[in-house]
Structure formats: C-alpha cells, structure tokens
C-alpha cells in the first residue's frame, strides 16, 4: 500500500531499476530521450550493421563521413564558417596517426587520438583564418589545405612523411578493431553535438553566428568561443583521419588530402541539415548509401544522381532534410517552423 | 508476456546472427572439395579505371583479361582440375576512376559481397596497393598483372602473385648496362614521385654510381606534372648526353611534346611507356616527337619462342589485334597473361580454396611459358622470369611512322641502335 501524500504522486520505490530508469527518463523529458537516442541508436545500428553487411570498409567510410559531416556541423552549423579546406584536418589526422605508429610505435588506438591532436594542432595553426569570413574564409581554408598537402607530399620530406610514396601500416592493420573505433568516434561526435545544442557554449556560438556584434555586447567572448568550435571541429576531422588511416592501412597523400572529401562532408551535412543533431548523420547515411548502391558499380550514374540531388536540395530544401521535419512538426503544432 | 516478447526478440536476433554468420562463412575463401557439386561458374573480380590518370593503361589490361575470358568461355569455360570439367567464367568489374581509396572499398566489395573466386588487381602499383592488405586480411590470392611495387612482396604475405612483369626495381638493369656499353657519362634522371618510378630511378642511380657515373641531374617531380618546359631547360643547361624521364603515360606524353617544342636536343632520350603503349604515344606525340626515343622492350614486340600455354604472339596479334600489331600493346598482353596464370591455377588446384589456388600457382612457377615469356615467381609471389631489354622507336614507312626495335642486349636485339640520335 503506497503511502498517502499530497501533490505529485511519487513513483513507488518497489518498482525497482526499471521504475527508477523510467523516472529518470521522465526527468530528462522528450528532448533528453531524443538526445540519448541520438548517441545510442547510431552506435547500436552500426555495431549491428557489420554483422549483416560484410563490406566493413564501406561501412567504415560511411562512419568516417558521418563524423566529418558532424565536424562541419560544429563549425558551419554553429558558427556559420564554411571551410572548403576541411580535408586538411582529415589528412593531418591520417598522417599524425600513421607517423605515430611508424616512428613512436604507439598502439593504433593511441595513434588515432594523436591523429585528433594533429588535427587540432593544425587547427590552432590556422586559427588566424577565422579573421576572414564568408567566401574569403572558404577560399583561404582551401589554400591552406593545398599548402599542407604540398608539404606532406614533398619528395624532399620523404624521410619524414614518406612524401608522395604513401603510408603503409600493414603491421597495425586490424579491420574489426578499427571499425569499432570508428563507431565509438561516431558516438563521440554525436555526443559532442548534443552537448553543443544543450550548452551555453552552443547557444553562444549560435548567437555569434546570427550577429557577432550583438553577441559580443551581450557578453559572449566571440573570438574564444569561435576558436574553440574551430578546434573541436578540426580534432573531429583529425580523429576521423586517424581511424581511416588505420583501417585502410595503405594510402597516398592524394587519398587523404583529396578535395572531394571536403565536398562530400559539406554536402552530407547540408543535405541532412546543419545545426541539427541527426541531420549530418542522416545526410551521410543516405548519400553514402546511394553511393554504395550506385557509385560502386556505375560511378558516372552516381555523379549524375548526386548532381540532381544537390540541385533539388538547393532549389527546394535549402535547410536540408532537417528543415523538412521541423516544418512538419511546426505544421502539426500549428506553428510555423520549429526550434532547431 | 514480457518474457515471451524478449524470447521472441532473442530468437530473432539469434536468427539474424546465424544468417550473418552463414553469409560470412560463404566468403571468397570457400573451399570446394572435389566431391562437392561444381559451381555454375567461376567468378573473376577486378577493377579498372574508366577515367583519371590510369585509364589509358588500365583499360587495355582489362581488355586483355576479357579476351582471355571470352576465349575460354567459347570452349565451355576454364578447365577446373578439382572437378575434372570446364566451368564458365563470369567477370565482375568495377570502375575505380583511378582512385586508390575508391579501389579499396571496391576490392572489399568484390571479396565480401560478390564473393569472387579469383581476385585480379587493377593496373599499376598505386591501384594495386590497397588490394594487397585487403586480400591478405581475407586470405584471398591477389593475381597482380602490373602492380610491380617492391614493397608488396614480403615474406609474411603469400596471398599475392605478380603475373606479368618483374618488380619495377629490376626493370632498368639492362638499361644501366646499355648506358655503360654506349660509354655515356653524363646522365640526367627526372622521375615521378611514386613507388613505381622512384624504385626504377633508385636502381638506375645505384647502377650508374657503381659504374663510376654520377647523374648530373637526379630530380623527383610530382606524378601530376604535365608541364615539362622549365624542367627540360634546367636539364639542358647541364648538358647531359642522356635524359631519362620516368613517369606514367600521362607524364611521358607531355614530356615528349614539350621536348619537341623546346628545341633542345639530347643524344639519348628515354621514357618508359612508348614500349608499352606505342600507338597511344605516337598518336599524341607524332612520329617526329617519338623518333629515336628509347624505352623498355615489351611483348608483343618481343616474341617468346617457347610457348607452352596460350597463344603465340602471332596468334594473339591475329586474334586480339585483328592481324595488326599496332592494335596490340603490352598491357593487353599483361591482362591476357594474368588469365593464363589463372587458367593454370584452376587446372592444377586440388580445390577452389584460395590456399589450393596459391599452391597450384607456385607449382607452375618455372614450368609455364607464354607469349609474355617465362612465368617464374619466388616464394613471395614476385616475378623473376622477365628481363626488359632496351628498345628504340625508329622511323619507318618513309618516316611517316615509327616502329619499335630491340637494341640491347645483343642476345635480344633485332636492330642496330642509333646513338646519338640525329
């Protein structure tokens, strides 16, 4: 017999762990459950997917692009800075991880972390680019990526970076463990975006994206917050590069500094919707899924399909798939749009 | 009720896991004992470059492989010793667009999804490199027609077989001897910064140094180089007697075009691909631009007198090139040669398991003689049986075209060398 009480009815303690979990979920609210789901569901799905579809490398590439799209989300979705040269951080991470394995003989997992650090260090070096904005920033980041590529692939540095002759990590190759690391990285990137969306930091970033001057007047330290987002985004790309290098084990500078990687990550993020938690992931899964269906056997049709999709996106859905769900939610609630 | 539901869920998951396990175990390494039912066809998986830097080299290689497949299928398929019968061949090919990262996913696709019985790599070292690790991981034999990077062949990896050429590091041995023989003391070497060209450059430099010749220029340029004007002027200022440019066709063509327009002249100009893709080079550079250029000598220009398997050079030119030697290039031969090695593996393997196929290939080493020469591999799968002579493009038909003459070594030569070039 539960004790009589006034006010909200307490949950009986004899409901056990399930009851306590339900109580915690209620406390989190619908938004909280959705946020927990945003981290747990993709991780679970990708862990299961590898048992149902055996081309692990294809799934890994999808994961890597999902992480990169989330990295673009962090910098573009929250600050409005669109780095066309984003691939520089990916390449830096791939080389940071690889050279750590080759010269420092560190375990591959630690090398991936060092790859993230390499991405962040390059990000720190390129922080002055944030003084630019719009197209100038996009082009400057592209030039920076090209410069990094030229340094890494320079034959004169072959004794350090292996120059244009590429990297061979056959001794560290472990397909299943590198896949698990990629899944964990996806979880980390989803968690990062969830935290950003819920934190004062994320709010400050969005305020600077909307109007930097007003945000500064409201007490936001714009330069610091923006630089921090830039470093987080660079570190995510570096980690993705590290995992990619580990998984593919043999690669050339042209593979990890390929501008197409930037373009894909940006398109995936825009397709799903930037500034959202799920958008970049959905974009990566849908578009890379199309790639795996069409692009493997008929890349020319894939490029055509991609081109048509992007044209349709720009014309009819400039806010990405995320804007579609927001619009539908708003429609059912009777309010225009909805909160991001 | 909840228990019942969870039991159902567990059963469903177990079912899924079993399905996944079943899919996994029916991979490319599936063995087929002679007592088992013969497969309806043997699946051969390969990649080709439909576009990009390697397209001009990759497509002839694929054409050669397709020719072998159609030739075998016309006879009812390839003879599979494990089943004592001919089984039709089926080709699965993907376009990697000259991208090694795309190639990595597609090699994985061929092994894990298409479950091919035979895996053949794309042209050259760059596009073969990702396949080496993937094939080793999945324990699938990689039939490698032209990926000659020396780093692929290691004592720990038995899942690779180089079917056509020796590793690129030994290609230039006769070239070095030729330079010594002609008493050329001033040599300039410009090479592309990739494994394939760098290993040749290293061999040449080491060989020349041993002979007391220090190259006057030894310079790496990016593989993407398509403008050689400044490089040629810089080299010309050093007055070399021989200018060796080591690159891919996409480098050789602009190099020879730039050289022709530069007005500079060298006693000996060497590039790697006129001997392999003569028609392509001549159609792009012209007879004047190509005349007297040195290159390696390859089949079908070199005819092997001892052919134990497959077509002779003459028959191949007749069947593949419709009787015109200019329709056939070395990479067509390399693709066909890969087919012949596969044919021998299928004929002599005790089952279709990958280990049996690899053992069968090893058993044929030294015994197989084709239009490409002797097939002779070491324990790491690297070809030892071939040595590439030095060839020269000589004016023919009233200087309207060029023909390939083998000029060195004397044992292989079919024409006299013209040095220095007029």
Image: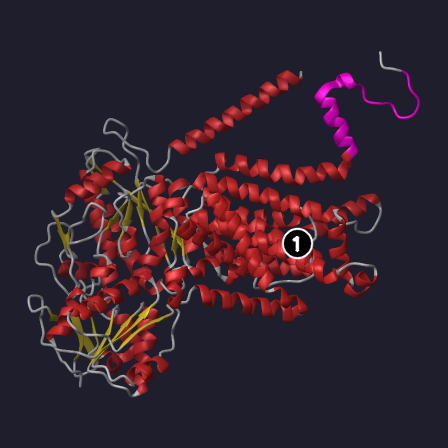
Q: Is residue A10 magenta?
A: yes
Q: Residue at x 32, y 61 (%)?
A: B195
Residue B325 rendering spot, x and y as whole percentages: 19, 67
- Residue B289 figure quarter: bottom left
Quickly name the residue at label 1: A74
The quarter of the picture where the C terminus of chain B appears is: bottom left
In the image, B75 versus A137, the foreground residue is A137
The quarter of the picture where the N terminus of chain B appears is: top right
Q: Residue at x 24, y 70 (%)?
A: B278
- Above or below, comparing residue B253 to residue B388 in the picture: below
Residue B93 rendering spot, x and y as whole percentages: 37, 50
For residue B297, say whether it is visible.
yes
- Residue A129 figure quarter: bottom right
Residue B205 rendering spot, x and y as whole percentages: 23, 69
Q: Is residue A15 magenta?
A: yes
For this orientation, the residue located farthest to the top is A1
- Residue B139 figure quarter: top left
**Segment colored magenta:** A4-27
Callout 1: helix, strand or loop? helix
């Amino acid at each position: 017999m539960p004790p009589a009480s006034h006010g909200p009815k307490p949950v009986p303690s004899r409901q056990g762990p399930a009851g306590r979990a339900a109580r915690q979920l209620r406390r989190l609210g619908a938004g909280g459950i959705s946020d927990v789901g945003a981290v747990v569901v993709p991780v679970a799905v990708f862990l299961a997917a590898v048992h149902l579809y055996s081309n692990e490398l294809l799934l890994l590439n999808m994961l890597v692009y999902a992480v990169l799209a989330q990295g673009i989300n962090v910098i573009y979705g929250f600050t409005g800075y669109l780095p066309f040269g984003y691939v520089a951080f990916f390449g830096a991470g791939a080389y940071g991880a690889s050279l750590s394995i080759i010269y420092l003989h560190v375990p591959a997992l630690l090398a991936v972390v060092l790859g993230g650090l390499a991405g962040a260090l390059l990000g720190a070096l390129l922080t002055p680019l944030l003084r630019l904005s719009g197209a100038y920033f996009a082009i400057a980041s592209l030039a920076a990526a090209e410069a990094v590529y030229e340094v890494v692939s320079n034959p004169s540095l072959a004794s350090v970076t292996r120059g244009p002759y590429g990297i061979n990590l056959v001794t560290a190759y472990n397909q299943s463990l590198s896949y698990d690391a990629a899944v964990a990285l996806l979880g980390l990137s989803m968690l990062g975006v969830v935290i950003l969306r819920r934190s004062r930091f994320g709010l400050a970033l969005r305020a600077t994206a909307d109007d930097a001057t007003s945000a500064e007047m409201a007490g936001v330290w714009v330069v610091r917050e923006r630089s921090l987002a830039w470093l987080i985004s660079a570190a995510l790309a570096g980690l993705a590069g590290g995992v990619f290098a580990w998984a593919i084990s043999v690669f050339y500078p042209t593979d990890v500094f390929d501008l197409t990687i930037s373009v894909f990550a940006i398109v995936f993020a825009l397709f799903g919707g930037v500034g959202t938690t799920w958008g970049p992931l959905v974009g990566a899964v849908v578009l890379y899924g199309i790639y795996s269906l069409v692009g493997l056997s008929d890349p020319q049709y894939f490029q055509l399909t991609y081109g048509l999709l992007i044209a349709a996106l720009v014309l009819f859905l400039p806010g990405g798939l995320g804007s579609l769900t927001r619009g539908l939610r708003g429609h059912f609630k009777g309010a225009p749009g909805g909160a991001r | 009720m909840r228990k019942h539901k969870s039991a159902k869920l567990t059963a469903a998951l177990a079912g899924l896991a079993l399905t996944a396990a079943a899919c996994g175990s029916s991979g490319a390494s599936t063995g087929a004992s002679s007592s088992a039912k013969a497969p309806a066809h043997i699946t051969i998986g390969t990649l080709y470059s439909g576009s990009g830097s390697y397209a001009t080299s990759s497509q002839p290689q694929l054409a050669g492989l397709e020719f072998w497949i159609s030739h075998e299928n016309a006879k009812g398929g390839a003879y599979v010793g494990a089943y004592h019968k001919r089984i039709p061949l089926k080709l699965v090919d993907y376009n990697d667009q000259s991208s090694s990262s795309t190639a990595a996913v597609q090699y994985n696709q061929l092994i894990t999804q298409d479950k091919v019985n035979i895996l053949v790599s794309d042209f050259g070292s760059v596009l073969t490199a990702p396949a080496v690790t993937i094939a080793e991981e999945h324990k699938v034999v990689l039939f490698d027609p032209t990926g000659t990077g020396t780093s692929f062949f290691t004592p720990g990896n038995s899942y690779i077989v180089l079917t056509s050429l020796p590793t690129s590091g030994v290609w230039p041995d006769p070239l070095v001897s030729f330079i010594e023989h002609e008493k050329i003391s001033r040599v300039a070497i410009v090479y592309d910064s990739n494994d394939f060209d760098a290993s040749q450059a290293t061999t040449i430099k080491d060989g020349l140094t041993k002979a007391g010749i220090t190259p006057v220029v030894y310079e790496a340029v990016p593989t993407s180089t398509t403008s050689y004007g400044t490089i040629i002027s810089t080299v010309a200022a050093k007055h070399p007697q021989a200018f060796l440019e080591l690159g891919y066709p996409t480098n050789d063509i602009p190099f020879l075009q730039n050289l022709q327009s530069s007005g500079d002249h060298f006693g000996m100009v060497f590039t790697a691909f006129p001997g392999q893709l003569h028609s392509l080079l001549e159609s792009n550079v012209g007879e004047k631009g190509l005349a007297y250029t040195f290159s390696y000598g390859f089949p079908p220009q070199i005819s092997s007198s001892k052919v134990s398997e497959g077509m002779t050079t003459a028959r191949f030119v007749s069947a593949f090139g419709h009787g015109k030697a200019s329709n056939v290039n070395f990479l067509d031969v390399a693709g066909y040669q890969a087919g012949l090695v596969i044919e021998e593996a299928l004929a002599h393997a005790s089952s279709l398991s990958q280990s049996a196929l690899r053992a069968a290939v090893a058993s044929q080493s030294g015994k197989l003689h084709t239009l490409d020469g002797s097939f002779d591999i070491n324990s790491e799968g690297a070809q030892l049986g071939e040595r590439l002579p030095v060839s020269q493009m000589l004016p023919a038909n009233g200087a309207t075209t060029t023909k390939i003459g083998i000029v060195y070594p004397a044992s292989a030569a079919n024409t006299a060398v013209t040095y220095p070039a007029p």
